[in-house]
Amino acid sequence: MKILLVEDEQKVSAFIKKGLEEQGYTIEVAYDGLMGIKLALEYEYDLLLLDVILPGRNGYEVCQEIRKYKIDLPILMLTALGTMQDKIKGFDTGADDYLLKPFHFEELLARIKSLTRRRLLAPSFAVYKIADLELDCYRKTVKRDGKEIVLTSKEFTLLEVLMANKGRVLSRAYIAEAVWGIDFNRGTNLIDVYINYLRRKIDKGAPVQLIHTIIGMGYVIKENG
């Protein structure tokens, strides 16, 4: 498994590189955002570990640029910026997961394994439909009534999980693990924030509301309220 690490602090990058190589991973390191973009777009990697505070281009900009061309590349942000706004910004630019510094190396390994496992299990060929809403996993497109809807990476994943389980009420714990990983902090309101993002893009102005809240149980996507 080949990983690109974009981290400007040489002690941190050396620590991560050594630890991951001991686990059998192949690691390449970029020390600034511009080189990170160049390497990520020119070569194939199984995972990107990305710091946020970088010279040249910051991690959010790097993530956004890479996502234009590599939709399926798992991206794990490593950063000391831990507010809810920071996390939402990271997810909105295309990150798949978010790990706060300082972290235990075992936690980093667990996040890497979780991300790569989710990638292998994802049915990339699937096309999900409900009412006039269609999600194409291969093309990474969403359309409602024939009109394309632009979603961020995390919004797409959340909608994919809902549509793969259409008609089934999903608990917050299930959604948290399926979309954000096993170590997601369930005490935050991040799930509610992203459900509201989806509602504004998917249901607002539509004759039929598809995303429903089941009080005390979770969320479901279905045609009838």
Image (cartoon, rainbow, N blue to C red):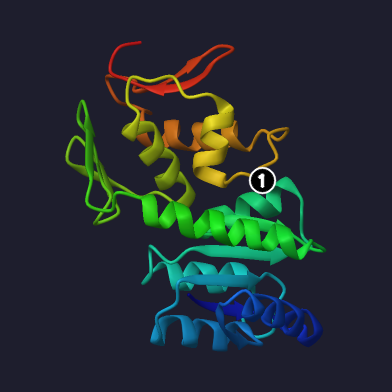
Direction from residue 93 to residue 102 in the image, left or right = right
Q: Amino acid at mark 1?
A: Asp
Nearest the eye: 198 or 164: 164
Query: Is residue 225 depicted above or below 165 in this figure?
Result: above
Q: Residue at x 66, y 52 (%)?
A: 87
Most extreme residue toward the left is 146
Q: Residue at x 36, y 34 (%)?
A: 202
Can residue 96 be seen from the camera position used here? no
Direction from residue 123 to residue 5 in the image, left or right = right
Nearest the eye: 180 or 62: 180
Q: Which residue is mark 1?
A: 183
Characterize the local packing of mark 1: few (<14), some (14-19) or many (20 or more) Cα atoms within 10 angstroms: some
Residue 91: % across, % down: 56, 53
Q: Residue at x 62, y 71 (%)?
A: 50
Which type of secondary structure does the marked residue at label 1 adopt?
loop
Residue 27: % across, % down: 57, 83
Which quadrant: the C terminus? Answer: top left
